[in-house]
Amino acid sequence: MMQLDRSDLDAARQHLTPDSALPLIRFMADQSLGAQAEVAPAEIRQQAADLGWVDARTGVRTTLGILISDSCREYLFWKERHGALPFENSLPHLARSTFRGKYVAEIGAGMGANLMSLSGTAGRLCGVEPVAAYAQLGQILRAREGIEGVEIWPGGAEDLPFEDGELDLVLCVTAHQYFDLHAALPEIARVTRPGGELIILGATLGQYAAGAGARVLRSGGRRSKYYLMTLINTLGYQAFGRRLLPRREAFSTSRPIYPSTGFMTRHLEAAGFETIAPPQPAAGEQCFYLRRREIGTGN
């Protein structure tokens, strides 16, 4: 579980919290999106290098810089959406009213941008995130915005820090591809109250194969190795219940899988959920909207 030590955390707080920090935040967000460091002002590049976020010689992000830049990217997207959810109102059941007054937990919350959007709407908010550094950075960026009442706890979808039936609604946004779904889906069902809801948004096999495949072709074959590895892992997981190519230890977001809609539906139902609305595209992803079955009606 990657975590910032006290000195790195204090430095991040000092340099990301002030109003004057926005150029540095934008620079780091741009690095996460693949922008060339040379186009940024020299003083910002030097500041990021002095903080150990980019290599002073090559301009490439350090491991710490990857964590910082990922969080800055999500925060900047949140600001550019003026605090709206990325999928808000793309389907009727993705309106804010679905979350109002409920105890909502987001699994794979990252730095907590979606929880920031739901602040003031949900009755209680909590995130679970396996990369502790993202939760730490989210706390800094929420303080920058004056947002309170959001907790992000360390952990993964396969072992959630909640009591049985504690949650009204579980949200997973572009996160399920990193789970061990055979363990995670029953665990999510365990912590969701009977009649409680589950919303999963993320790409499925067909969407990934078409979208990523087209990008590989446009790039002249760059990243084709990653594309093929992801397809192999997805098909292997669907057939054998495991990734054939193991994750790298450093990052929980390595080696994603994109199971088919049919696979997801079958395993969600087996875990104890029933479909409220048929799976359908939303904001470029596939949306699964389900309800935990009531006691006495199945699992």
Image (tube, grey):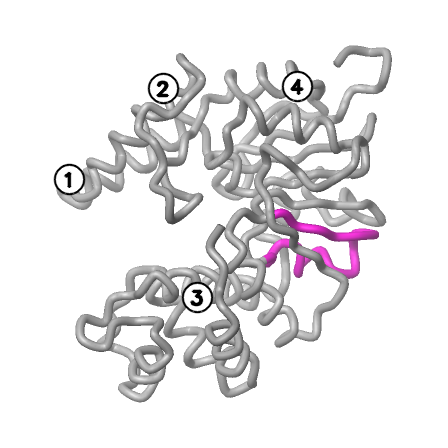
What stretch of residues is rendered in magenta? 112-128
Q: Which quadrant of the view contains residue 103?
A: top right
Above or below for 152 versus 216: below
Queried whether the magenta region covers residue 42, the answer comes back as no
**Along the polypeptide, which appears first: circle 3 or circle 4?**
3
Q: Residue 68 at what x, y percent from top left?
A: 44, 66
Residue 189: assigned label: none
Mark nearer the viewer, 2 or 3? 3
Which callout, 4 or 1, points at the residue further toward the start of the chain? 1
Circles 2 and 3: CB atoms closer than 8 Å: no
Residue 127 on the magenta span: yes
Q: Are marks 1 and 2 in contact (CB under 8 Å)?
A: no
Q: Helix or strand or loop: what does disc 2 sit on?
A: helix
From the image, tell me which residue sits under label 2: 235
Q: Position of residue 76 (x, y in %)?
A: 50, 67
- Residue at (50, 38) in percent of width and height: 285
Give the class, few, some or many, for how many residues have Cα within 10 Å of label 2's Cα (few <14, many ≥20).
some
Circle 1 sits on which residue? Answer: 221
Q: Give amino acid for label 2.
A: Leu
Secondary structure state at the residue bearing disc 3 = helix
Q: Going 68% across and 42% down the picture, which residue do you hit?
A: 94
In this rendering, would 90 be left or right of 16? right
The answer for how far apart the CA atoms under marks 3 and 4 are is: 36 Å
Q: For mark 3, what is the residue?
A: 68
